[in-house]
């Protein structure tokens, strides 16, 4: 594999005007769609198949290895099977981690299909709140977060013979922590003379020296890819509206290219993608004769699974498939048939400022590495074309690599997990890339405020409350809220609310039916905010016998609602194991809001005399997100679930609280915050 094949001479184009690329125009004959190929033949046709024997030979010998291969070469689906077929690691489970839940599920489904077994038998998956494995499972796909949780119960990872840390280039915070956990497990197993643990790191990008060094100079194995040449075009001028530019570019391609050439568009998030999908569908209805039909498919992590799977299917004959996706299609999901990539150059990702403690989700520029990954999606089966909706100068100014998430997120959960794993000193933990001391300190401070940790003889230890908090697969602020709910006699309701906030939204908002949706929602809306409104919806759903028809009429996503039931039941089990009394506050919502205020006091915002809001923690100017049921209201004091930065900094999912409750929850903290404001 050579990265050079990625860097064809780039040309410039202007969205909206037909560009003048002779090669492209020359390729405009209608192309027939390929017939489906039997699955065994598909396996043999993957680039990795050529290297099978050699790979097996090398992996049998090696304790740790780093494998690099272009996305789509077959690393994730084939390597676990090759190991299994060659009886490597048969004494235990071959675990393969994925940063994304949807990838873990769809990969497990694909590999069990390739092995012609039922999902959950030989091949299974485990993601938060959902475990589809059995005694027989030997190849297990799991999110990096799940493996980390398993390590809490068993730091030596005894059930595993092989751990594959996949998509390592994504550098999610969980994968980064797993590096350290797996390395320790491997060393300790060796020292104790136990079954060795084989560690394989897989990456789609070349910059793996760091991983190799970290694993004591583990050899790097390169897979020969099948990258076809890709032409890259930049815009002549910077684009002020990347959505408009993307739309124009899609239809420009659509009018000129044969219908078998599919298009993949990279946008940043669900709302944007749904809106663009609708616009494309509307425009496609009114195109002149002779233009092919268009099948537009959205793709994002919280899309219902069945709809996600649609992107793998061919579009009907004479239809062009246009997939509008988040960065999920960058590496974790491989879609065949893509000839064109439209790259807006934007991504929604976390940003964190340890000084202010502020973590926000923001739309920001991608890195060069991401830009090349996106480009690469166009050249899997044949030569392709990538339109970058930014200028070459703008490209040159992008960061070279994506900053690891561990260096740009709130580390409270991570520190809590490391403490449960009995890491002796968090500040000196062997991280692949160290987070800043400031953000570690700030995480420790937050855990201290939540009452999860204390200092004993200069050692940071978990309090009994902290230990209990770590038992929940939740962010510390949510586990804390559940744990204090018995004091407020509203555990039933808090479990429901936390479950509702832990799954993808139960609200289904088809843009075409806005008025109907509003009419149907009205009866549930609580002036006390989104948490209470969601609680009303859940109660109605439950009282009416969990009825699918009811969900449809009320624009509720029934699949996600079923997931809420499932998650709630699991959280409730954890409470029961801890002998927590589980009471309901029934019609009294004051207790519930008081409890939320006590658990989430660090996420509070206050109305200012000029009608704006600022957060209590950092005095950041924030607004109520338009999706909130409180959008047109001005409550004096709220807690919010998260901050999202698009054109402004928005608070999402709000609950009206009393300022006094916040003071009661953490008097010291608020005294300090107030002092700071006065100074
Ligand atoms: P890599 O890990 O190297 O990116 P994968 O093993 O994920 O590659 O994918 C190899 C090929 O398997 C893909 O190009 C695609 O053709 C096929 N594939 C993977 N997942 C699915 C799926 N869920 N449905 C259909 N085909 C799939
Ligand atoms: Mg992969």
Image (cartoon, helix red, strand yellow):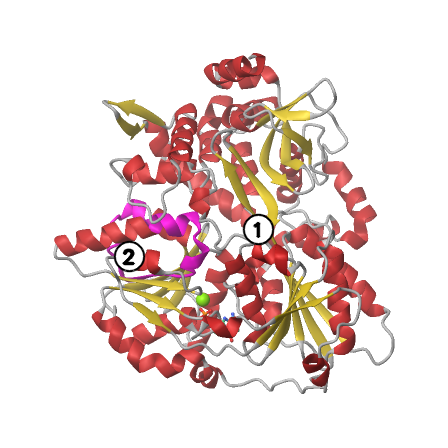
Circle nearer the N terminus (1, 2):
2
Which residue sits at x=56%, y=78%? 229
Q: Residue at x 50, y 60 (%)?
A: 369
Number of the label disc, if any, that sits on residue 562: 1
Residue 267 on image: x %, y %: 65, 57
Q: Which mark is residue 127?
A: none
Instruction: In the rendered view, tell whether residue 321 sits above or below residue 647.
Output: below
Q: Residues within 10 Å of mark 2 (few under 14, many from 20)?
A: few
Other residues around mark 1 within 10 Å, as few (<14) / some (14–19) / many (≥20): some
Measured as percent of width and height from the top left, residue 546 is found at 62, 48
Residue 592 image position (x, y, % from top left): 57, 26
Circles 1 and 2: CB distance less than 8 Å?
Answer: no
Q: Is residue 156 visible?
A: no
Name the image quarter holding residue 35.
Answer: bottom right
Image height of 382 relative to 427, above or below: below
Quadrant hosting residue 232: bottom right
Local secondary structure at mark 2: helix
Image quadrant in which the N terminus is located? bottom left
Q: Which mark is drawn over residue 213?
A: 2
Ligand 2: quadrant of the figure: bottom left
In this view of the protein, which residue sits in the foreground, 488 or 381? 381
66 falls in the magenta region: no
Q: Is residue 519 above or below residue 329?
A: above
Judge whether residue 562 can be spotted in this image. yes
Q: Residue at x 32, y 46 (%)?
A: 431
Q: Looking at the picture, how far across and down is residue 309, in whole percent? A: 58, 67
User: With 291 as the anchor, is 11 left or right in this view?
Assistant: left
SS under mark 1: helix
Residues rendered magenta in the picture: 150-178
Mark 2: is the Cβ under 8 angstroms from ligand 2?
no
């Amino acid at each position: 594999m050579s990265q050079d094949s990625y860097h064809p001479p780039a040309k410039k184009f202007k969205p909206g005007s037909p560009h003048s690329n002779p090669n492209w125009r020359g390729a405009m004959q209608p192309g027939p769609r390929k017939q489906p190929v039997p699955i065994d033949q598909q396996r043999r046709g993957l680039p990795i198949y050529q290297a099978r024997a050699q790979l097996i030979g090398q992996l049998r010998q090696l304790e740790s290895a780093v494998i690099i291969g272009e996305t789509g070469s077959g690393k994730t689906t084939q390597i676990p099977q090759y190991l299994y077929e060659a009886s490597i690691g048969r004494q235990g489970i071959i675990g393969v981690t994925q940063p994304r839940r949807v990838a873990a599920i769809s990969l497990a489904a694909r590999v069990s299909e390739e092995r012609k077994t039922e999902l959950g038998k030989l091949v299974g998956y485990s993601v938060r709140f959902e475990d589809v494995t059995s005694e027989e499972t030997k190849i297990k796909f799991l999110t990096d977060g799940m493996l980390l949780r398993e390590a809490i119960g068993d730091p030596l990872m005894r059930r595993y013979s092989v751990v594959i840390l996949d998509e390592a280039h994504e550098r999610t915070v969980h994968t980064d922590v797993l590096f350290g956990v797996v390395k320790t497990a491997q060393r300790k197993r060796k020292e104790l003379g136990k079954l060795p643990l084989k560690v394989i790191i897989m990456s789609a990008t070349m910059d793996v020296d760091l991983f190799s060094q970290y694993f004591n100079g583990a050899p790097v194995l390169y897979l020969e890819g099948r990258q076809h040449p890709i032409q890259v075009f930049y815009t002549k001028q910077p684009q002020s509206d990347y959505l408009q530019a993307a739309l124009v570019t899609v239809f420009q391609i659509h009018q000129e290219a044969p219908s078998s050439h599919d298009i993949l568009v990279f946008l940043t998030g669900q709302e944007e993608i749904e809106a663009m999908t609708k616009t494309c569908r509307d425009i496609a209805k009114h195109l002149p004769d002779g233009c092919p039909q268009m099948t537009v498919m959205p793709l994002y992590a919280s899309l219902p699974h069945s709809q996600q799977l649609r992107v793998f299917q061919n579009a009907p004959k004479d239809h062009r498939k246009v997939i509008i996706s988040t960065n999920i299609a960058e590496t974790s999901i491989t879609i065949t048939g893509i000839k064109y990539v439209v790259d807006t150059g934007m991504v929604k990702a976390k940003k964190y400022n340890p000084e202010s403690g502020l973590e926000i989700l923001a739309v920001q520029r991608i890195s060069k590495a991401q830009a090349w990954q996106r480009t690469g999606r166009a050249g899997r089966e044949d030569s392709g074309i990538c339109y970058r909706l930014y200028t070459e100068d703008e490209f040159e100014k992008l960061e070279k690599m994506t900053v690891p998430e561990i260096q740009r997120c709130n580390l409270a959960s991570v520190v809590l997990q490391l403490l449960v794993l009995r890491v002796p000193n968090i500040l000196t933990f062997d991280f692949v890339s160290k987070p800043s001391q400031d953000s570690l300190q700030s995480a420790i401070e937050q855990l201290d405020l939540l009452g999860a940790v204390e200092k004993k003889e200069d050692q940071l230890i978990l309090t009994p409350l902290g230990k209990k908090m770590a038992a929940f697969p939740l962010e510390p602020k949510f586990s804390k809220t559940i744990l204090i709910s018995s004091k407020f006699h509203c555990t039933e309701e808090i479990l429901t609310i936390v479950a509702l906030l832990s799954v993808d939204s139960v609200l289904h908002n088809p843009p075409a039916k806005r008025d109907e949706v509003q009419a149907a929602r009205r009866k549930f809306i609580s002036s006390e905010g989104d948490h209470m409104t969601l609680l009303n919806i859940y109660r109605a759903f439950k009282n009416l016998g969990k009825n699918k028809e009811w969900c449809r009429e009320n624009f509720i996503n029934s699949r996600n609602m079923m997931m809420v039931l499932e998650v709630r039941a699991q959280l409730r089990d954890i409470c029961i194991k801890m002998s927590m009394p589980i009471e309901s506050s029934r019609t009294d919502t004051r207790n519930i809001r008081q409890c939320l205020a006590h658990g989430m006091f660090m996420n509070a915002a206050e109305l200012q005399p000029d009608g704006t809001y600022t957060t209590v923690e950092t005095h950041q100017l924030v607004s109520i997100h338009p999706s909130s049921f409180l959008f047109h209201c001005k409550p004096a004091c709220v807690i919010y679930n998260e901050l999202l930065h698009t054109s402004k900094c928005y608070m999402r999912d709000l609950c009206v609280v009393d300022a006094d409750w916040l003071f009661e929850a953490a008097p010291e903290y608020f005294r300090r915050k107030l002092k700071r404001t006065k100074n």
